[in-house]
Image: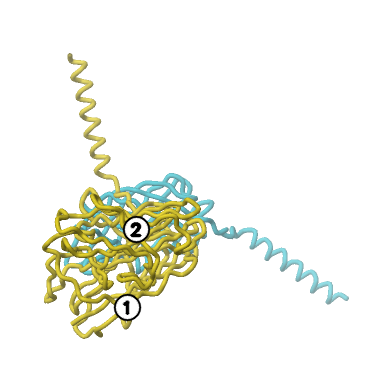
Amino acid sequence: MRKLLTVGAALGLFAAFAAAAVADTAPAPTPFPASSVGPVFIAAQTATTTGVMSSWFAPGTSVVFRAYAVDTKTDKVLGAKDVKYFYVTVPGQPNVKLKYDPTAPGASKRMAWTGTWNVPAAYPAGIVNFKVLAKTNSKRQGSFVQIPVATAQLNISPKSPPTAPNGPSSSAPVPDSPQLALYVDSVNGTAPPGAPVRPIGCTQTNIYRRGERMVVRTWGFDLKSGQTLSTDNVDTATMTIPGQAPIQLAYSAHGATGNKVWFWSNFFIFPADFPLGDVTVHVVFHTDSGQAGAVDYPITVTP
Amino acid sequence: MKKISSTVVALVAATVVTGAALAGTTAHKPIAFAASFSGNATTQSSDNVVTINANGTGAGTGLGAAKIAGLGTGDSSKQPCVPFTGTGKMTGTSGTLSFKVTPGSSGCGDEQGQTFSVSGHAVVLKGTGKKLAGAKGTLKMTGTYDRSSGAFSVKFTGKI
């Protein structure tokens, strides 16, 4: 009995030490969406039929899924003739097939694959864990899911805030053979003092009022090495807003405790005298190995 | 003829002396340096100035098994990334490396201000040991830091 107690005490002590050791472990980054790229890279957004990015939709409205994809072996952006299939799975709904047409409602030159989901009036409120899937004619496959930050994911709710009538003009297309595969979006950040407060924080949008805080979020891969872009391999990562000094993007953790993921981001607060209308946010990455990539991300600034 | 001979003798002597001097100098051959450490860091805030004190263990090229100690300051008024600078020293079984963290280095936190990514550059001030004596250059520095536990990990890479 005494021997058992001794062993028990030793085990307890060991467990305590082990717990202490675990508690003192530095956080290991969890790159979103993965530490290395798969056979097909996909970036996708949700928008209205007029090109306004949004992550909140009311039942009975239409969600436009728009996307682009890159074969990571050939580094070729996928066009209409390159894919066997390209579609969106929505829980409890028929698949939404994506079609290549840069002029389709809600499409952009960069995200020319689109498909529209008409949300049923009775669709349950909450996060829609959709997935975008593609397969090339050469049988290479890829998938896309959203960053797991609840309010910035696709949500269906009767209380969805209204969206602006029109989105910004179309962005520049993806280069034919990019060195880096990049995803970019933006969300409304915490309202600065005196700025209008949106009903829901941290929702995806490309329309900002003067005084609001825009948070640009981006992630991607070096197509030569296949590695996720992180501080380990990125030399500089910046976003530039016309008339402003470049803003360094930060690689850090985001999301709920226990489900944090790492990506690049930073914010900009639109001054009260910021010119109104469409603006292009220029997001640029340069890696330590000399690879480079850029995204021209269009937004609209309103009074 | 005598004059020419004297000149030749002087030149030869100069050459010998120069050669001897060069032989006495060990020129540093640049190496690909990599080191990683983990440990504990404490921070103390006063107004917007954060004093950082970090100590850890690890290993590195030309160092062998090593310890790292660093002292720096950060500006917590800047968000989401806190810029910091400071100095530090890696002390290993085979050599040492003193460094200075350059402006532009920062720690970027999550929404809760608990988990930070650390990135920046460190200029080598002095190296000792067989591989690191005479080392000069700049190292890239990346890592993570958990404010609640104080645990950090950091990597240094570069050619020095």
Where is A270 relative to A258, above or below?
below
The disc labelled 1 sits on which kind of residue? Answer: Ser
A215 or A26: nearer the viewer:
A215
For image coordinates 16% across by 73% down, the residue present is: A192
The disc labelled 2 sits on which kind of residue? Answer: Lys
Q: Chain letter for cyan, please.
A: B
Question: Can see residue A260?
Answer: no
Q: Position of residue A204 (x, y in %)?
A: 23, 66
Q: Residues within 10 Å of mark 1 (few under 14, many from 20)?
A: some
Q: Residues within 10 Å of mark 2 (few under 14, many from 20)?
A: some
Q: Secondary structure at mark 1?
A: loop
Q: Chain letter for yellow, please.
A: A
Q: Are marks 2 and 1 on the same chain?
A: yes
Q: Chain of mark 2?
A: A
| Foreground label between 2 and 1 | 2
Q: Position of residue B63 (x, y in %)?
A: 46, 49
Give the residue pinned by disc 1. Answer: A169
B8 or B81: nearer the viewer:
B81
Q: Position of residue B142 (x, y in %)?
A: 37, 57
Disc 2 and disc 1: Cα gap in Å? 24 Å
For image coordinates 18% across by 71% down, the residue present is: A163
